[in-house]
Image (cartoon, coloured by chain):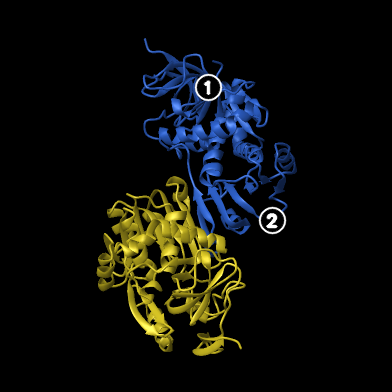
Chain colours: A blue, B yellow
Amino acid sequence: MTLTMRAVEVQDDESLKIVDLPRPEPKGAEVLVKVHAFGVNRGDLLQRKGMYPSPKGASPLMGLEACGVVEAVGPEADRWSVGDKVCALLPGGGYASYAVADAGSCLPLPEGCDFEQGASLTETMMTVWTNVFDVCALKPGETFLVHGGTSGIGVSAIQMAKQWGCKVLTTAGTPEKCVAAKTVGADVAINYKTEDFVEVVKAEGGVDVILDMVGGDYVAKNIESLNKLGRMVNIAYMQGPKVELNLMPFMLKRLTMTGSTLRARTPAEKRHVRDGVERDFWGMIAADKINPVVYKVFPMEEIEAAHALMASSEHIGKIVVTTGA
Amino acid sequence: MTLTMRAVEVQDDESLKIVDLPRPEPKGAEVLVKVHAFGVNRGDLLQRKGMYPSPKGASPLMGLEACGVVEAVGPEADRWSVGDKVCALLPGGGYASYAVADAGSCLPLPEGCDFEQGASLTETMMTVWTNVFDVCALKPGETFLVHGGTSGIGVSAIQMAKQWGCKVLTTAGTPEKCVAAKTVGADVAINYKTEDFVEVVKAEGGVDVILDMVGGDYVAKNIESLNKLGRMVNIAYMQGPKVELNLMPFMLKRLTMTGSTLRARTPAEKRHVRDGVERDFWGMIAADKINPVVYKVFPMEEIEAAHALMASSEHIGKIVVTTGA
């Protein structure tokens, strides 16, 4: 008898449907997680449209992070035992009542967090750590700018950089979002619809590291905003990747520009990121120094509403879905 | 009585004239070097046209590197004594029979090298080390591409990367230059006038690090040539810094682009570079593993001919000038 699970499947017309599918089995270094809640990420909307498929070998379902209880353990999986509560980064497959995760992509559910909160942490904290703290090597005392300060990435990046001892600037699109960004810790929140962020950044003395997901004409503006030896990293190009640039500041200010995706990385690369997040930041959650920011929780039956909210960009923080498991 | 020196001065009509000027005195951590020979660099041609002035506080004369004998030592200068033969990186002032250099910007003249050879090493080896080995962290076993393989930078970069255990690709503009680039150690030399370098690089399996001084449409081609986690660094934009780019490969291949100048750095930053070159490569010169490549030596009276040769780009390796000191 094949065990089944409930899962959100994309139909040919791009609508979403909850269906019964065979439950995956943990192979090699994987663990099987009974998913209580999963996080919604902007990439899910792209995947739904066929533009951001799962990497080879991963579940074709949407879902980059999940939180739940370990139900079974693969023969080569380290650290985890049946019954452990975990937050898991996934290459796909989180939109289901069961998912397999590499053991090296899992973190323990922090004390004091429920499953919904746990589902809001992994993707953003790993993304911020690898880009801002590992690749761009943000140092205490430096100044940091993250665009989209009330996105899931934004609220994580602001809190992590503040805890790291940095001055934090951010951009957001409404006065309410600017207030929210300051509430989670930003020193300066710039309403990009009414202010030129470059001017404000320069008045604040420039920035050393920028985390950007906007692209387009923000790239040239970021270059202008960076101090000597500044670094910028793109995790998306929401306004497009095609740009016209004058690169001379790269020489004169010795700037560095880079970018990355997390999803396509190898299990070993993700383990490195998991270890970094755990070492530098994970304990701050139970200590109430970094707080999950869950904007709204939907039951899986309302997945369409969860996606509509993500598309609207009206949320502040993370959108989470519960499976009913 | 003021001591004097002979120096090359740029006249109002951009012509060059040998004049008598007051000899500089070593202050602070500086040493005074009696210059026997100095290297000609492409930046000198820009400075002559008023486009690349010396940094504040430095000699307004041209000359980024010189080789000679320590004649006097400033009160805070470490390591050097009167009579030491040194190769000095300079922020300016090398086109003269005396120059002051920061003690931390000097290296000992390698055994077996004459002053002309010593004058050909410092600027290129420090530039290559800081960009390729420090910032881009080229690792043994990786593949490296340097454009302009027969320039002063090119012949240094090829030799240093080969000694580091890398596969080395380069570009050059004539069959003769391609032969010369292979003679100094390049595994693959691409004639960019008859071959598409991107195609050749891809057929060779791509590259991990690129040292570029061309800019312009080479930037997009470099992006195409880089492997996953590839790094590129610009030390000039001879074809201009304005580019149209699709940045998506920065995310998908996790590329890094940076750039730098050496001249404007602080003495402490240059000391770091000097120490790196000395630790990793300087001993290889006396050991005949890295060889100075001096294309032609001019007496100072023929400085116009030396500049004309640099402008022609017909040289292979370095152009050196002797002061007659």
Q: Mark 2 or mark 1, which is nearer the start of the sequence?
A: 1
Q: Position of residue A50 (x, y in %)?
A: 45, 37
Judged from the image, the secondary structure of the residue bearing numbered disc 2 is: loop
Q: Nearer the viewer, residue A2 or A113?
A: A113
Above or below, B149 relative to A61: below
Chain under callout 1: A
Q: Residue B121, relative to residue A233: is it above or below?
A: below
- Could you tell me how far apart the alpha carbons at marks 1 and 2 are, in whole angstroms? 41 Å
- Along the viewing direction, whichever of A128 and B244 lies nearer the viewer: A128
- Tag of residue A205: 2
Picture residue at 38% right of the left edge, 61% below the top:
B282
The quadrant in which the N terminus of chain B is found is bottom right
Say whether residue A253 is visible. no
* B288 to A1, vertically: above or below: below
As rendered, which of A216 and B95 lies closer to the eye?
A: B95
In the image, residue A159 lies at what x, y percent?
65, 37
Visible residue check, residue B255 = yes
The three-letter code of the residue at mark 1 reads: Val
Q: Quadrant of residue A52?
A: top left
Which of the labelled discs sits on residue A86, or is there none? 1
- In this view, the residue farthest toward the front is B82
Q: Quadrant of residue A299?
A: top right
- Tag nearer the camera, 1 or 2: 2
**Residue at left offset 48%, top offset 81%:** B95
